[in-house]
Amino acid sequence: MTPPDSRQRFDLMFRVQHGILFVSVLIAIVTGLPMKFPDAWLSQTTVTLLGGVEARAWLHRGAGLVMVGLGLFHWLWYVLLDRRIPFYRRGVVPTPQDATHLVQHVKYNLGLADSLPRMGRYTWFEKFDYIGVTWGIAVMGLTGLPMLFMDQALRFIPLSWLQALWAAHSEEAMLATLFLLAIHMYNTHFSPERFPMSLTWWHGRISQEDMEKYHPLELEAIEAREDAPDQPGRDVPARAGESDAPPTTGPAADTPAVAPAAGPSEEPPP
């Protein structure tokens, strides 16, 4: 259900990428855990339901290739091809201020601070999520591809290295699974204010209440631009290092970082 008072936060391209990532990671987890715990009864049942050992293996490899391919596309697009905003200026890139936000957020949760930190387009924990996904895809790809092409890899590296890569692949997969279940799913779906699920991943919209609570600096910048319709390209940064507004010159300057409810987001995530 779309929030009645909401703004478009994520465009269709981002939501499609998130959907592909979600499906590929889910398949990789379901097909990978039986390899991690082969003697567990649930692993044996899972392999049977998937169609056998060979089918499980092909599903796992396919999911891994899709995940790595998506990661490469994401970085090629946002770092090299989409030049509306240099990547280092995008709101998802961590800054020293995020450490301050983290400390204040912890104090707020402990009752030692009166308010949450005033954050921009991405909160410190959203940036942490992004780093985790980026790191995870890189590690899983670098450790998984040599195992997928084992015969070719053994021409260049000894078997002991391949065994080490398998161990790293396995442990990183468990770390990623636990992170998704314990941190990402809680922050985005299972916390009391969002339970049973936030549908932002589906319709790309965020409520005005969430904007005011978690992204006040971005909201102030958006409203400042909306209040100046005759100057749509005016740069109104929320705070140094926090604004995702485009440069004040060029065709991208006429589009806000997060558009009002009628339009799509200016800055395609990340």
Image (tube, helix red, strand yellow):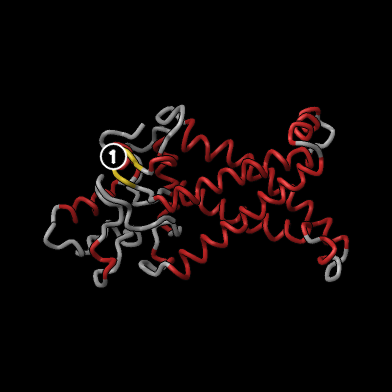
Q: Could you tell me residue 176's position as x and y percent? A: 63, 45
Q: Is residue 177 left or right of residue 106?
A: right
SS for tag 1? Answer: strand
Taking the view exactly as shown, the residue that stands out farthest to the left is 230
Q: Could you tell me residue 110's position as x and y percent? A: 43, 33
Q: Is residue 98 left or right of residue 235?
A: right
Quadrant of the rendering where the N terminus is positioned: top left
Residue at (46%, 37%) from the top-left corner?
188
Q: Could you tell me residue 24's position as x and y percent? A: 61, 46
Q: Could you tell me residue 206's position as x and y percent? A: 34, 41
Q: Is residue 89 left or right of residue 137?
A: left
CA neighbours of label 1 inside 10 A, class few (<14), some (14 to 19), many (20+)? some
Q: Nearer the viewer, residue 182 or 112?
A: 182
Instruction: Specify the amino acid type for callout 1.
Output: Ser
Residue 201 seen: yes
Residue at (25%, 66%) from the top-left corner?
253
Q: Considering only vertical position in the picture, is 83 above or below 42? A: below
Q: Nearer the viewer, residue 168 or 261?
A: 261
Q: Considering only vertical position in the picture, is 46 above or below 26? A: above
Residue at (26%, 69%) from the top-left corner?
251
Quadrant of the rendering where the C terminus is positioned: bottom left
Q: Is residue 259 left or right of residue 16?
A: left
Number of numbered markers? 1
Residue at (84%, 56%) from the top-left corner?
163
Residue on which disc 1 sits: 6
Residue 128 seen: no
